[in-house]
Image (cartoon, helix red, strand yellow):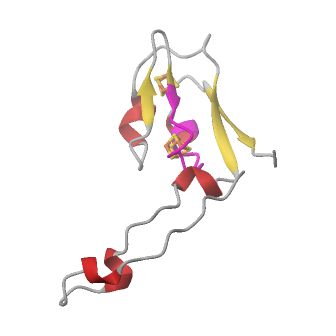
Amino acid sequence: MKRQPKEFFDQSRIPGDLCPIATEPMDVKTGDWRAERPVVDRERCVKCATCWLFCPTQCVLEKPAWFEADLEICKGCGICASECPHHAITMVEEVEE
Ligand code: SF4
Ligand code: SF4
């Protein structure tokens, strides 16, 4: 996976009474450090939306006949695979490009 260049952080944008660490906007997407990705078996998916409901990053997208993760945001936690009642999601190890 490619790392995105980190831009210089302009602290003047942070109000004085807020913690700069907690309020610094992240330019690294969660999908950049994922170790595994969810792969949906489209034949098994019945569009029940359980994965959409449980995904902590709300990155599951509805497609014409199945659901799948937005891989820019998906952090690879595997909750969708654990919760899918039709065992349609498999977590697959990411490989370096
Ligand atoms: S939980 Fe499983 S069956 Fe339900 S929409 Fe998601 S992938 Fe499809
Ligand atoms: S692996 Fe985690 S973050 Fe990615 S789609 Fe599944 S529940 Fe969401």
Which quadrant is home to the C terminus?
top right
Question: Residue 2 magenta-drawn?
Answer: no
Q: Residue at x 26, y 77 (%)?
A: 13
Whole-percent x and y of residue 22? 34, 79
Whether residue 65 is situated above or below residue 30 in the rendered picture:
above
Q: Is residue 77 magenta?
A: yes
Residue 93 in percent (x, y) is at 76, 45
Q: Main secondary structure of the magenta part?
A: loop
Q: Give the residues drawn in magenta, as a range.
A: 68-81
On the rendered structure, is 27 left or right of 10?
right
- In depth, the one of 64 and 26 nearer the eye is 26
The residue located at (50%, 16%) in the rendering is 66
User: Which residue sits furthest bottom?
Assistant: 17
x, y (%) of residue 19?
A: 29, 86
Relative to 34, residue 21 above or below: below
Rendered view: 41 above or below 60: above
Which is more toward the observer, 41 or 74? 74
Q: Is residue 36 left or right of residue 9?
A: right
Report the residue at 48% width, 13% height from top. Answer: 46
